[in-house]
Amino acid sequence: MSINNEEFRPQIVAFCCNWCSYAGADLAGSSRLAYPADVKIIRVPCSCRVNPMFILRAFEKGADGVIICGCHPGDCHYSTGNYYARRRMTLLFSMLDYVGIERGRTRVEWVSAAEGVKFSQTMNEFVETIRGLGKNVRLGDLRCKK
Amino acid sequence: MHGIGVFVCHCGSNIAATVDVEKVVEMAKLEPGVVHAEEYQYMCSEAGQEKIATAIREKNLKGIVVCSCSPRMHEATFRKCAEKAGINPYMVEIANIREQCSWIHKDVEEGTEKAVILTRAAIAKVNLNTSLVPGESLVTKRALVIGGGIAGIQTALDIADAGYEVDIVEKTPSIGGKMSQLDKTFPTLDCSACILTPKMVDAAAHEKITLYTYSEVEKVSGFVGDFTVEIRKKARYVNMDKCTGCGVCMEKCPSKKAPSEFNAGLNNRTAIYTPFAQAIPNVPVIDPNQCTKLKTGKCGVCEKFCQAGAIDYTQQDEIVTQKYGAIVVATGFDVIKLDNYDEYAYSQSKDVITSLELERIMNAAGPTKGHLERMSDGKHPKNIVFIQCVGSRCNDSKGKPYCSKICCMYTAKHAMLIRDKYPDVNVTVFYIDVRTPGKNFDEFYRRAVEEYGVNYVKGQVGKVTPEPDGSLTVHGVDLLENKQLKVSADMVVLAAAIEPNPAVRKIATMLTASIDTNNFLTEAHPKLRPVESPTAGVFLSGVCQGPKDIPETVSQAGAAAIKVVGLLAKDKLLTNPCTAKPDELRCNGCSVCANVCPYGAISYEDKLINDHGVRETRRVAAVNSALCQGCGACTVACPSGVMDLQGFSNRQIIAEVDAICR
Ligand SMILES: Cc1cc2nc3c(=O)[nH]c(=O)nc-3n(C[C@H](O)[C@H](O)[C@H](O)COP(=O)(O)OP(=O)(O)OC[C@H]3O[C@@H](n4cnc5c(N)ncnc54)[C@H](O)[C@@H]3O)c2cc1C
Ligand code: SF4
Ligand code: SF4
Ligand code: FES
């Protein structure tokens, strides 16, 4: 690939559950814990609301990485949502890996409302990994491209 | 949708400093459906809201996007504003361009670009918003308080005085908590029991308060206004209705070797016991692990002596099911285990004790009847060393990262009380910092130094070594004098860190209330909603939320109570309208969705469906919107993709994805 990693700004979608991780992101914000602007957050009520279709769609539309953040196991606001998310994402990610979307481009992370530091660290790490992997080309919808 | 308005907030300079708000407005205007966009200094202010309302009315807006702080901050404000201006409150979306953008990106170009994208995503979403109407649910006018320490007692009293029924569930045999173990209390030095016991009696006597002592919460279901809770009343083996509290059973019980929890394990209690003389209720329990009768079938002494015939070895645990509108967690704290701090010789010497143990030693009802004695040989100590911050303010995993907040003050108290009663005893305190923010706190500490001559040494202790002659050598440093110190002591007192009661994890999970990395319960907002948990209907009182002393605990307890009263005063609550909804035309009644719903909100009914002219009866999913909490688990589980979540629909989220990845 001819992309220079220095200039490469990845497109990253982060799905955050409303109760823990979105609040953790808010805390990262109010504590001024920086992470790259490449990360864009979509608020969902719970990590279990994340349909695998959303992730496929993101990759199809040009995302280079997708991360799902939820409450720690046992702490989900709806008790069990993150267990479903974990199971679904394990399957989906291995499938994606199989079709060529490397493991590093997908991630599930548990971030509580009190973990602003962890949120920022996670995002920094994730962006770093994606920068290393470069542009994602595998799932691009060719019909969408001009 | 045509008729979207976009309102970009400067938030003073919070947003405007790193986001070019004018550019955001300009770019928003180019998005499909947007007919109006403007920026303003403070959108949440009255003037800002007026701007929004005017635009809604004049431009006939159908939906709005506010680009501002987190929706967790002001979504409700802008929804109300929209509703007042005549549109459905759920036609509002927030682009979080402060917490997620201006506050974390320093580069204006980068910040602006991201703000534009976040705004674009919110516009794409609001395009697909639909009007939603909240349902209503009834409020059960009864509150549950978990934990009967001073926090729980005060909260219950305040709720009960406002006229509502309250139940206190306390896991030990008596209410009172840690405060009942304390001797005197800073900063006034009044006796702890003298101020606590009347409150305990009030709680027990209050016609609106029911005590479930020696009980634990077993299961919680439901939601704000309508919780159902199962309480396990552990078998006391003593009939509460018959027992007169005479105490003869405790006198006669031959099994006397159980460490007394109340005296911090410094002496023993009998198998049948009340934790302390003023226990409420004054009805003993039999500890099944210690009772010979329960273990081997032999003995039965207490039954023989009990005049009231209250002993019942066949008693079983009982489960009580009760409905509540609100739940308060007041599970308090414990002192940390000192296994990681063996350098202080806690496990090697009986004369190295924790501050809580010292409270018991100084207390007239304690193991030494209030005489200051060494636990090893009963001798009166001449030199006492206090070590502060044991396990507090640690930057490694050995201890806790936080300040336990109360230790500086209680050590000043202990030092002062000892010097007051025994002027012959030398008291040295090793500290990192002395922290005394609080009314009359610094004055109190200065009295310890100036009036009572307590020797404060700034510096840490590396090690305590027990000597063959029974004394202890404390190896420390004096940072101000910059020298190593070796102090000989007869007694060493460790100000051990406090931590939330370990059982709180289980409680938090049952209530789906969140806890932080240190197991303290998280508040809904650290400044503005300090006594509410993020879970509606669950409130926080006392040290379970964070370290605090008694005055602070009592204030917070009252604050939690008023929040509960505010909730119970309502007859009905509006429910979250963002609930799941199946497309009945395409649902095939496969029954997958009900399996994943944590609230049992989904059932199946045979319904007459008109499928493009074909009318037939089909089995389809039906969501009970009063039970559905809107997690969305079912929407993903549905193999036909026909279950959707209102307010967070598949199309809405995909529109956001598209807008971000455009
Ligand atoms: C050595 C020492 C000295 C102190 N001296 C002072 C002082 O001089 N002045 C001062 O202002 N403060 C002092 N404090 C602080 C004071 O003790 C606390 O502020 C106060 O006790 C907090 O009350 P609480 O009700 O939050 O917690 P607690 O007193 O811990 O009460 C919690 C209650 O909940 C119960 N519980 C726990 N888990 C469950 C469960 N799962 N189900 C049911 N019940 C449960 C517990 O058994 C307990 O009864 C001192 C603390 C220590 C350790
Ligand atoms: S959204 Fe969650 S709570 Fe509502 S019906 Fe679906 S699974 Fe149950
Ligand atoms: S999972 Fe989908 S198709 Fe199956 S019953 Fe539920 S809504 Fe209908
Ligand atoms: S609410 Fe956070 S994972 Fe379910």
Image: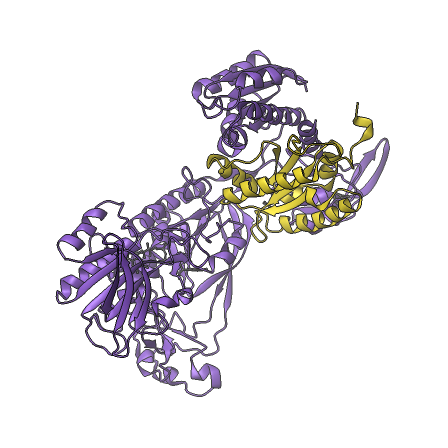
Chain colours: A yellow, B purple
User: Could one spot residue B216 in this view of the protein?
Assistant: yes
User: Could one spot residue B360 in this view of the protein?
Assistant: no
Q: Position of residue B26 (x, y in %)?
A: 59, 15
Q: Position of residue A113 (x, y in %)?
A: 51, 43
Q: Position of residue B254 (x, y in %)?
A: 35, 85
Q: Which residue is nearer to you in this view: B390 or B216?
A: B390
Q: Quadrant of residue B310?
A: bottom left
Relative to residue B101, is residue B562 drawn left or right?
Answer: left
Residue A25 lies, with reference to residue B113, above or below; the image says: below
Relative to residue B112, is residue B11 drawn left or right?
Answer: left
Q: How many marks?
A: 0
Question: Split into 4 quadrants, where in the image is the C terminus of chain A?
Answer: top right
Q: Residue furthest bottom?
A: B298
Residue at image point 23% right, 44% down = B439
Relative to residue A139, is residue B163 drawn left or right?
Answer: left
Residue at image point 62% right, 40% down = A128
Relative to residue B614, is residue B304 drawn left or right?
Answer: left
Q: Residue furthest top?
A: B58
Residue B652 lies, with reference to residue A105, above or below; the image says: above
Q: Which residue is nearer to you in this view: B597 or B444?
A: B444
Q: Quadrant of residue A130?
A: top right
Question: Split into 4 quadrants, where in the image is the N terminus of chain A?
Answer: top right
